[in-house]
Image (tube, rainbow, N blue to C red):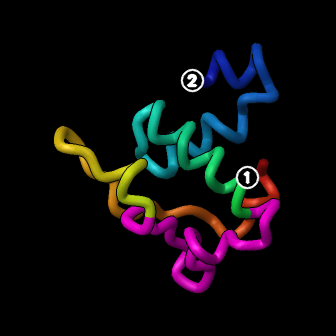
C-alpha cells in the first residue's frame, strides 16, 4: 500500500480509508462513492454519525449486508468528507 500511495498520490486518501475501515476493496469503493453522493446531497448524516465517528453500513443493507461477509459499522475520523 505504501508504494501505491507514493506512486499514485491521488489514491492516498482512499487507501487510508480502506485501511482504517477494514472494508474489502469492493465494499470500500461502494462506501467511498456513497459518502461522495450523500455529501453532495447534504445527507452524509444518514450514513455517518459524527459524534461517534461511525459509518453505519447497516443502513444500506443492499450494499453491505451479504451472505459471505457483512459490514455493519466502521470507524472513521470526523474529517471524512474533507478527504474526498
Residue farthest along the bottom direction in this orientation: 51
Residue 63 pos. (x, y %): 42, 48
Residue 34 pos. (x, y %): 62, 52
Residue nearest the observer in this picture, 11 or 36 = 36
Chain part drawn in magenta: 39-59
Name the residue rendered at 78%, 66% in the picture: 41
Name the residue rendered at 18%, 43% in the picture: 67
Residue nearest the observer in this picture, 28 or 39 = 39
Q: Is residue 15 magenta?
A: no
- Report, in whole angstroms, how far the alpha carbon at label 2 lies from the one at label 1: 23 Å
Can you tell which quarter of the image residue 66 is in?
A: top left
Name the residue rendered at 37%, 65% in the picture: 58
Residue nearest the observer in this picture, 54 or 7 = 54
Q: Secondary structure at mark 2?
A: loop
Q: Secondary structure at mark 1?
A: helix
Q: Nearer the viewer, mark 2 or mark 1?
A: 1
Q: Quadrant of the N terminus?
A: top right
Q: What residue is disc 1 on? A: 36
Relative vertical location of residue 45 with respect to residue 68 in this rendering, above or below = below
Residue farthest along the left direction in this orientation: 67
Q: What residue is disc 2 on? A: 1
Relative vertical location of residue 52 with respect to residue 11 in this rendering, above or below = below
Amino acid at each position: 500500500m505504501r508504494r501505491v500511495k507514493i506512486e499514485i498520490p491521488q489514491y492516498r486518501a482512499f487507501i487510508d480509508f480502506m485501511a482504517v475501515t477494514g472494508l474489502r476493496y469492493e465494499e470500500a469503493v461502494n462506501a467511498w462513492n456513497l459518502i461522495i453522493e450523500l455529501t453532495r446531497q447534504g445527507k452524509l448524516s444518514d450514513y455517518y454519525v459524527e459524534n461517534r465517528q461511525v459509518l453505519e453500513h447497516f443502513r444500506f443493507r443492499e450494499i453491505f449486508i451479504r451472505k459471505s461477509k457483512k459490514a455493519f459499522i466502521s470507524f472513521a475520523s470526523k474529517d471524512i468528507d474533507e478527504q474526498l
